[in-house]
């Protein structure tokens, strides 16, 4: 979140210990992770200061540390990279790529086209709380831009066309999967006399 709730009367180190305890991270591993994360996010020298003295950017970095303290299998990142300086964003990208390469699932919510292209393998387009399209990022970004730049009087038509196109692609994918599986079954069925 843009303004993460962090306990202002704890130090950064205490907050990360608390977060590690919540995730039941073994103490030795927790201390190791805290050290790594504080160094990576340039917070080590401030770790003994109360969070209430942290700048907004420092709080964002500490929140990222807390989210990563337990080596998550699923990471939800909701517009977190919309704030912070370029260096912070680069560190986040790097860490997210590492987590992704270790096999974790990342749910990345963003309006940033460049970020989506850089980080995502699959994208969803959600409009008014409804998933209206899913696929490779370049295709979904095209759908998003069609919606974004459609005139008010054409909005519903553009939206419905995106939904129809997506429904057709899902139907074709199911058909292709069925045909592939059916073909495999035919090849493996043997007749013995």
Image (cartoon, helix red, strand yellow):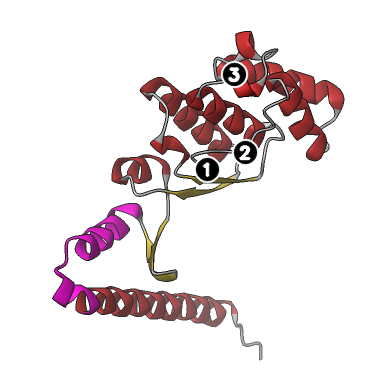
Please tell me whether the stretch drawn in magenta is mainly helix, strand or loop. Answer: helix
Q: Depth-wise, is mark 3 or mark 1 nearer the camera?
A: 3
Identity of the residue furthest to the top in this view: 45
* Residue 1, disc: 1
Residue 76 in percent (x, y) is at: 56, 47
The residues colored magenta run: 137-156
Query: From the viewer's perspective, is residue 136 above or below residue 37?
Result: below
Measuring 26% from the left and 63% from the top, which residue is drawn there? Answer: 143
Q: Quadrant of residue 90?
A: top left
**Few, some or many C-alpha atoms within 10 Å of disc 1 (few <14, some 14-19, many ≥20)?**
few
Measuring 32% from the left and 76% from the top, which residue is drawn there? Answer: 163
Residue identified by numbered label 3 = 53
Residue nearer the viewer, 64 or 58? 58
- Badge 2 element: loop
Residue identified by numbered label 2 = 5
Residues at circles 2 and 1 in contact by the CB criterion of under 8 Å: yes
Q: CA distance from mark 3 to mark 1?
A: 19 Å
**Few, some or many C-alpha atoms within 10 Å of disc 3 (few <14, some 14-19, many ≥20)?**
few
Measuring 70% from the left and 12% from the top, which residue is drawn there? Answer: 48
Residue nearer the viewer, 39 or 101? 39
Q: CA distance from mark 2 to mark 3?
A: 14 Å
Residue 42 in percent (x, y) is at: 55, 15
* Residue 36, disc: none
């Amino acid at each position: 979140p843009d303004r993460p709730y962090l306990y202002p009367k704890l130090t950064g180190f205490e907050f990360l210990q608390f977060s590690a305890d919540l995730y039941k991270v073994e103490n030795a591993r927790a201390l190791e992770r805290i050290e790594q994360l504080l160094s990576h996010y340039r917070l080590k020298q401030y770790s003994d200061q109360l969070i209430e003295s942290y700048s907004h950017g420092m709080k964002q970095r500490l929140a990222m540390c807390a989210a990563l303290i337990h080596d998550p299998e699923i990471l939800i990142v909701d517009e977190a990279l919309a704030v912070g300086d370029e260096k912070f964003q680069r560190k986040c990208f790097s860490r997210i790529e590492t987590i992704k390469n270790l096999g974790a699932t990342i749910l990345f919510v963003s309006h940033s086209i460049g970020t989506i292209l850089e980080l995502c393998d699959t994208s969803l387009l959600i409009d008014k709380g409804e998933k209206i399209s899913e696929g490779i990022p370049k295709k979904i970004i095209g759908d998003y831009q069609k919606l974004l730049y459609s005139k008010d009087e054409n909005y519903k038509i553009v939206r419905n066309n995106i939904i129809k196109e997506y429904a057709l692609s899902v139907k074709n994918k199911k058909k292709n999967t069925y045909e592939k599986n059916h073909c495999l079954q035919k090849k493996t069925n043997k007749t013995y006399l």
